[in-house]
């Protein structure tokens, strides 16, 4: 179990380090921050050292948390309803924060990303500048129109198994969104009698980030 956990931790660091390097077209601001956030060892203990989730008093869900004295730490925060954001953080081996990124879905960064060196100097990247006329909030309204989520009360963000009900990917070069509704339609495709058939199949849409034109992808 420890080996599986270690492999997952390394893959998560690798995936998000790639995301962190893609900062070309955003406004950057570097400043010094004397007091930096530290990895919370006490919360780590409350998650049974990463094997369980933990909910803070304010309703924030802590998941995918881990720490290694050589590699550093990582965690994901899911703010309480009605928010549809996910916060991803990495920490240096000394416990100081290394990066903080805010996502809508699991792949599209929004708001302000923060990247720290080991001395506490922070580079801030304004992620919202990459979007066109259609903003992430408009994509959420589209999902609400499809009765996937409810923006006012936060329902529909996760399914009964605690997994995301949708994914949003933004291509800043094409200025377009790809929206995946995970359980978008009943599965009526022929079954080959190997394994258990999926009850639902995903629905995929493309939204032009400038015009708002919606296209269903087959």
Image (cartoon, helix red, strand yellow):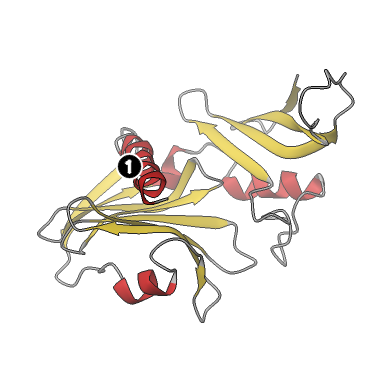
Residue 214 vs 163, above or below: the answer is above
The spot of residue 120 in percent (x, y) is: 15, 61
Q: Point out the residue furthest to the bottom here.
A: 57
Left or right: 82 in relation to 11 = right
Callout 1: 10 Å neighbours few (<14), some, many (20+)? Answer: few
Give the residue at x 33% y 37%: 14
Residue 7, located in which quarter of the rendered image? top left
Left or right: 70 in relation to 209 = left
Q: Secondary structure under badge 1? A: helix
The spot of residue 65 in percent (x, y) is: 40, 59
Give the residue at x 44% y 38%: 130
Give the residue at x 78% y 22%: 194
Q: Which residue bears the numbered disc 1?
A: 10
Q: Quadrant of the C terminus?
A: top right
The spot of residue 10 in percent (x, y) is: 32, 42
Give the residue at x 50% y 70%: 54
């Amino acid at each position: 179990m420890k080996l599986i956990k270690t492999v997952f931790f390394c893959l998560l660091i690798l995936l998000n380090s790639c995301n962190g390097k893609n900062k070309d077209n955003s406004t950057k601001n570097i400043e010094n921050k004397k007091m930096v956030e530290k990895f919370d060892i006490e919360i780590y203990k409350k998650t049974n050292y990463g094997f369980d989730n933990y909910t803070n008093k304010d309703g924030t869900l802590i998941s995918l948390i881990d720490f290694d004295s050589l590699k550093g730490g990582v965690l994901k925060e899911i703010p309480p309803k009605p928010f549809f954001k996910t916060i991803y953080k990495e920490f240096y081996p000394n416990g100081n924060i290394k990066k903080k990124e805010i996502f809508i879905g699991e792949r599209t960064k929004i708001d302000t990303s923060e990247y720290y060196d080991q001395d506490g100097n922070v580079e801030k990247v304004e992620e919202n500048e990459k979007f066109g006329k259609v903003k992430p909030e408009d994509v959420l309204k589209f999902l609400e129109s499809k009765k996937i989520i409810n923006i006012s009360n936060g329902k529909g963000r996760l399914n009964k198994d605690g997994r995301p009900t949708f994914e949003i990917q933004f291509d800043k070069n094409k200025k377009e969104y790809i929206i995946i509704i995970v359980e978008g339609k009943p599965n009526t495709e022929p079954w080959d009698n190997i394994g258990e058939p999926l009850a639902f199949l995903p629905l995929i849409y493309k939204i032009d980030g400038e015009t708002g034109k919606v296209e269903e992808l087959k």
